[in-house]
Amino acid sequence: MSVTYSNYLKIEELLKLQEPRSEKPEHDEILFIIIHQVYELWFKQILHEADFLSQLLAAEGSATGSVSKVGHTLKRILTILKTMVAQVDILETMTPMSFSSFRSRLDEASGFQSAQFREFEFVLGHRDRRMLRFHAEVPAALESLQRRLDEPSVYQAFLGFLKRRGYGIPDQALQPLDDGPPPEMQEIREILIDIYRSNDRLAAVCELLVDLDEGLQEWRYRHVKMVERTIGTKQGTGGSRGAAYLKSTLFKPVFPDLWTIRAEL
């Protein structure tokens, strides 16, 4: 059989994956399912790009070529993040009444259980080992998350990239962390300030990392407001604290040194 648009993209199988649980089904449940399935596909692509980014940062070779490819990959991740944020606008067309018409059918299901989003957080450096317990019943997800904890974050890969180019990055800054964002370090801040003042190409990469950090915070903020708009202060599905939990994740940068140096540039 020849390759067609349909069989290459598995369109027939794809369009059968939306299975509402409400009896009618409720009109907006299809929208809810499709939006979240699309998010999971974007998470998959972002992880694919983040892994490629880490490979580029870890590779030896032409500094000029590597910096260009790193910048290109970061721009792609940022564009995907902007697309994901824009999709919140579609979710917000769903009123509280329309969501409540099928919300009880979700049972324990919650976006809090998205293993791929948690992977993305771990890749960037926002790590919390306690989150592993929410994926204990899915061995493949648990294995992937544990692997992310054992690997350097994107920021640590960037610091390693700088170290191989002669910058005096402390060895302890390159060790994978189990919990929290990377700690701020005066030695690294001094190096970053020097880069901003003397190396435009690397400074541009630093700015893209800041854009990525800001993009993640924008996603969190839009997610909080969407949840507040839809369910108010109700408890989230799956037993999470809903909007209250999401608010607790706001304004926590994953690349803190890159924000702290703003006052010194």
Image (spheres, rainbow, N blue to C red):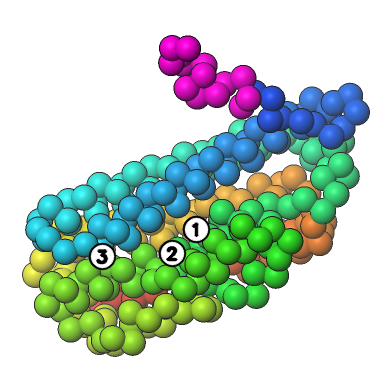
Q: 195 above or below 201?
A: below
Q: Which mark is residue 124?
A: 2
* Disc 1 to disc 3, C-alpha distance: 19 Å
In the image, residue 262 above or below residue 95: below
Q: Which residue is mark 3?
A: 58
Tell me the distance, in whole angstroms, between the alpha carbons under discs 3 and 2. Answer: 15 Å
Q: Position of residue 129 (x, y in %)?
A: 60, 75
Q: Name the secondary structure under disc 2.
A: helix
**How many other residues sit within 10 Å of disc 2, few (<14), some (14-19) or many (≥20)?**
many
Q: Residue at x 61, y 58 (%)?
A: 141
Circle 1 or circle 3, nearest the eye: 3
Do the residues bearing badges 1 and 3 touch, measured as CB atoms within 8 Å? no
Specify whether residue 157 is in view.
Answer: yes
Q: Which residues are magenta?
A: 1-14
Residue type (three-letter) at the residue carrying disc 2: Leu
Other-residue count near label 3 (Cα within 10 Å), few / some / many at <14 / 14–19 / ≥20: some
Q: Position of residue 135 (x, y in %)?
A: 68, 62
Type of amino acid at the residue the image marks with label 1: Phe
Instruction: Answer whether residue 9 is magenta in the image.
Output: yes
